Amino acid sequence: MTQEFTDYLETDDWKNSAAIVGMIRFFEFAGIPYNRDEIFQADEEYDDDSGYSEGLDRLKFNKSDMDADIIKDKFIAFIEDYFAEDMHHLYVEAALLNKTEWTEEEKADINKRLSANTVMKRCFGKLKFDGTNRAEILEVIRQNRDEMIIETYRYKGYKNFCNENVFQQPGGDAVRLKGYYIDYKRKSRSVSYRYNNKLFQSSDSAYYDFIPFGFVTGRESFFIHDNSSIRQLYLTNQKLQDRCREQAGNSPNGRTDARRNLFESLIYSSDFVDFDVEIIKKDSGKDYFETLYLRRESIDIFKRIKNYSVFCRSIKFGNEWVEIHREVTDAVSNLQLMDDLIQELLKKDVGDNQSNHAILSGNIIRLNALIRSKINGGGDIMNKAMRSACASAVNAAEVLKRRKQTNKISSYRTKLLNALLFHDYDRFSEILLNLSNFTDVYFPFAYYLFEDFEANKDAAYTFVNCFNDYTRKPDEEAESGF
C-alpha cells in the first residue's frame, strides 16, 4: 500500500531545490519516510504540457514525523556528522580516546580546541587538559554535547548561509538566507514600493534550515541547481559531495577544495553535467549568494582540459596572492578573456627569469584562445596562428642562442611585452619585423596580426611566452593542461 503524505516541497526555485536535497540527506540519515520510490525508481517521462509527473519534482513527507523528540535528537546527530570538521569536541574526543600519553604539543592543541569558540569556552570554563584529567574532559563533552553541536553549527555552518538568530524558528516575514533577510519591523517600508510595507512580499520557510545541507561546503560552497527532476538534482549534487569527501579523506588536513572538485568533475566525468546549468555559490567571506550560469560553450572548453592541476597554484603579484584556478574557472564560466592575467604573468616572467611561469602562461593563453573563439566564432585559424607563433619564437631564440646573443632575447622580449601592455600594436608589429630580419627567421603567423591584431592577440601572447632562453617545451605532456 502506498503511504499517504501530508506535506510537500517543489523544486520551483534554487532555494527550494537546495532545501529538498538537504532534507533528503537528513531523511536518509534519520530513517524518515518520504516518496523515495517515486523519486528514485519511477521512469522519468516528460510531458510537454505538464512537465515531469509530480512525483519527480515534488518531495513528499509528513511534517509530523519531523516534530517528534527522537527526530530532533537525530537532527543534532545529523548536524554533527555533516559538519564534523567544524566540531571541536569531536577532535578533542578522538585525541583523548585514541591515546593514553600526550606530548606537550598535543596537550596545547587539545587546550586550544577547548577554547576555540564561545560555546566551548562556556562549557569548559577554566578547565584545561593536563594529561591526567581525561575522564573529566570527556564527561563535560557528554553532558554538553547537544549544546556544543547546535551552537557551533549556528555560528559556523548555519551562519554562513542564514541569519543565525532564526535557526529552527518557523517561517517568518523575511527569507532567512544571507542577502535576502531584512528586519521586517524596521526595514519593510524602506524596501517596499512607495514605502508602503503592505506591499512588501517575502517568502520564508522553516525548511530553509536544510539549505546548508544541500550545499557542498567549504570556504566556497556550491549547489548545482540541476532541477530537471529531483532524482537528477540529488544525484548530481551527491556526485560532487562524494568527490569532495574522497579528496578530504586523502588530504593530510582532512580539508577539501569544493571549487576544484566541481570543475574537475565537469572536466573528467562525462556523465556529470553536459548542458546549461545554474550553479549557486556561497563564499564564506561574503554576505550574499552568487549565481553562476554555466553554459554549454563553457562546458565544452572545460572538457578540452586534460590536466586541471596545472592551474592549481597561487602566484604573488605585487603584495597580493592570486589563486590561478579561481581566475581561470571564473573566466571560462563567464566567457571572459584573461588578457590582464596573461600580461601579469608575462611581466613577472620577463622581470624574473628564475620564476619561470611559461608553462602556466602557455596553458592560460590556449584557454584564452578557446574563449576568444567562442566569442568571435573562430577556432582553427587561431590554433594555426598560435602554433606558428610558438614555432617561430623557438626558432628565433635558437638562432640567438647559437650566436651567444641571449641578451638580445631578453631585450626583444621586453620590447614586445611593453608594446602589448600599452596596446601599441603597430609598435609590436614593427619590433616583430625587426626581429625576423635580425635572426633571418620567417614568421608566418605575423600575417594574422597584420590583418586583425585584436582578434589574433593570443598568437602575440604565445610568441612572447615562447621566445626565451629557459622555458621548457610548452607542449610537454607532463605539465600541459591540454
Image (cartoon, rainbow, N blue to C red):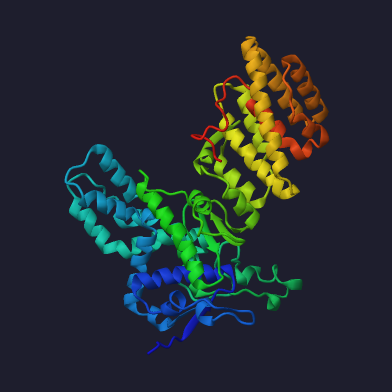
Q: Quadrant of residue 337?
A: top right
- Please give left or right for residue 42 compared with residue 467 in the image: left
Q: Does residue 32 lie above or below 115 as drawn?
A: below
- Please give left or right for residue 150 compared with residue 135 in the image: right
- Please give left or right for residue 95 compared with residue 481 in the image: left
How many marks on residues? 0
Residue found at x 69% / y 68%: 191
Residue at the bottom extreme, as displayed: 1
Q: Quadrant of residue 213?
A: bottom left
Quick check: can you spot residue 249? yes
Q: Where, quadrant-wise, is the N terminus in this rendering?
A: bottom left
Residue found at x 32% / y 65%: 146
- Please give left or right for residue 171 compared with residue 137 in the image: right
Q: Nearer the viewer, residue 25 or 374?
A: 374
Residue 19 position, x and y percent, is 50, 70
Residue 360 position, x and y percent, is 57, 34
Residue at the top extreme, as displayed: 404
Q: Does residue 37 lie above or below 89 as drawn?
A: below
Residue 177 position, x and y percent, is 55, 65
Q: Does residue 480 lie above or below 146 as drawn?
A: above
Residue 467 position, x and y percent, is 65, 24
Q: Where, quadrant-wise, is the C terminus in this rendering?
A: top right
Residue found at x 65% / y 54%: 297
Q: Nearer the viewer, residue 175 or 301?
A: 301
Q: Nearer the viewer, residue 388 or 178?
A: 388
Quick check: can you spot residue 125? no
